[in-house]
Amino acid sequence: MLQVKSLTKTFGGFKAVNGANLDVKKGEIIAVIGPNGAGKTTLFNLITGILKPDSGQVFFKNEDITGLPPYIVCKKRISRSFQVVNVFQRRTVFENVQVSVLARENKTWNLFTPSKKLVIEETNRILESVGLIDKGDDISAALSHGDRKVLEIAMALGGNPEFLILDEPTAGMAAEETDRCIDLIKQLSEKMGLTILFCEHDMELVFSISDRIMVMVRGSTIIQGSCEEVRCNEAVQDAYLGGSDVCLM
Amino acid sequence: MVTKGRIGAYAGIIFLLALPLFFPRFYVYIASLILLYGLLATSLNFVLGFGGIYQFHHCVFYGAGAYGAALMLTKTGFSPWVGFIVGPLVAALLSLILGLICIRLSKLYFGMLQISLGSLVWAVIYRWYSLTGGDDGIHGISVPDMIASANGAYYFALIVTGLSFFIIFKILKSPFGSVLQGIRDNPIRSEMIGVNVKRHQLAALVISGFFAGVAGVLFVVVDTTVFPDMLFWTLSMEVMIMCLLGGWFTFMGPILGAALIVLLRTFISTYTVYWALFLGIVLMIIIFFLPNGVLGYFQEKFRPKKLVKG
């Protein structure tokens, strides 16, 4: 479904992403792992068009989407959540998700119909599915960190994606919030049939839900394979454990 | 259901309608000024408070609307009403042109470029004697008899600002308004949910410029003059202060701010020429103690407690 071919991005001499390769098939859950600064978030920014790559290509459903601006990438039904919470702070939870649904339905140029009459059912359905329905009227800046991360995902769902990119979905969450988030990701994959690409530092989470794992070190892909293949791979041990031959997890 | 708020609104409307019956001419004139500055500030706040666009030199569009109408009225034989419509259209067109150039930059950089280009427009109007009368401006513009008296001008301003406020309010509550506020809070996220951010911002700037032009036309009607100071950057700062003073995340805030500033200027300047000094002090106090503006403060304080859903 998504192929990334030798993608490269340089920031003033520093190669943030240097020949990253990735292959995601429909319906898979793929994790990207790697030490801090390996270029995971930059890779996601390149795929979604927030940054333009220096070289390399991104194909989505066999269509070249390299360097397209984010609002067009989104129309191809790729959605993402952000690592640092990135919601519309002054708006309510409901409005946050509603805007996303309105944008998908191309209603943003409607100047005179009151928003409160539009896409209510769809918005409530999404809030229901992520468990934020009771907090619809809260101003999103007032939410707990965990709830805001979930709101992130809800906003991404507003675009009715086929392909969902989650940048550290559980970062900074308390243990029970993490569990809730894992359930949510599994549900999105199983019930809604979404293809999910995510990055995460929580190895337990990574190994428990991913179909395959891609490992990035210093901007390059060193391996993409099943959990077993990655767990005892030498290069991975090198990167994470400094050459010891203990398997991850 | 008749709420307290609704009774208050009706009382306000009746007060505004009856105002010329009880107050002398001078106060009616001041009230007209408050209305048109209120509209000017609201049109700025549409992009500033709700769009997050730092339009530093907003008065360019106010001036463009005023000059557009004034030139139509004095230099052509068209009906004055045509001039009143052309003014805002000129402002909207200018807003589109400046917007196209400035929108590539964001935040403060947008503001700096916009204030420079706006000053350029001011310089053109200031220097182009043969057309604009230069720093003399244009005086004694004759408007239709119906709205030529102080009361006539007041009612005209009241109807036009009322209608404009209604339209701006409607737009803010529409999907376009929701998107605009989303862009204010987070442009990158807006792009990522499928919104072409620049294009929506540009549209917002054109709408805002149009209503600034409407305020400019109202000034022509109320004062029957235009002069280059209407496009000078100091007035833009004053209008921005109106927004901040009243509360730039509220709809009514800028109108309140406009009323406060016009009243301060009118009444303190009868005692001292240093009225701006008092404005400065008032502004500092507000920034320190009411960072969300006067109305923002009261809204926060008296926001009804939310019902807990069971």
Image: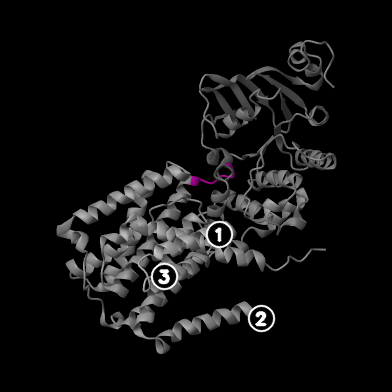
Q: Where residue A39 sits: x, y (%)? A: 63, 25
Residue under the point 55% across and 59% down: B249
> What numbered label is drawn on residue B249?
1
- The residue depicted at 83 percent of the width and 10 percent of the height is A245
* Residue of label 3: B262
Residue annotated with mark 2: B1
* Element on which disc 2 rests: loop
Q: Judge depth for marks 3 and 1 and give the one in front.
A: 3
The answer to whether the residues at label 3 and label 2 have Cβ atoms under 8 Å apart is no
Q: Residue at x 73, y 67 (%)?
A: B305
Q: Is residue B196 magenta?
A: yes
What subunit carries mark 2? Answer: B
Q: Which quadrant holds residue A224?
A: top right
Q: Secondary structure at mark 1?
A: loop
Q: Is residue A194 magenta?
A: no
Q: What crowding class fits label 3: few (fewer than 14 Cα within 10 Å), some (14-19), or many (20 or more)? A: some
Same subunit, labels 3 and 1: the answer reads yes
Q: CA distance from mark 1 to mark 2?
A: 27 Å
In the displayed structure, A245 sits above or below B62; it is above
Relative image position of residue A70 (x, y in whole percent): 55, 38
* Residue A115 falls left or right of residue B214: right
Which chain letter matches label 3?
Answer: B
Residue in front for this viewpoint, A171 or A60:
A171
Q: Which residues are magenta?
A: B192-197
Q: Amino acid at mark 3?
A: Val
* Mark 3 vs mark 1, CA separation in Å: 21 Å
SS at circle 3: helix
Q: Is residue B131 visible?
A: yes
> Mark 1, mark 2: which one is toward the viewer?
1
Q: Magenta stretch: dominant SS?
A: loop
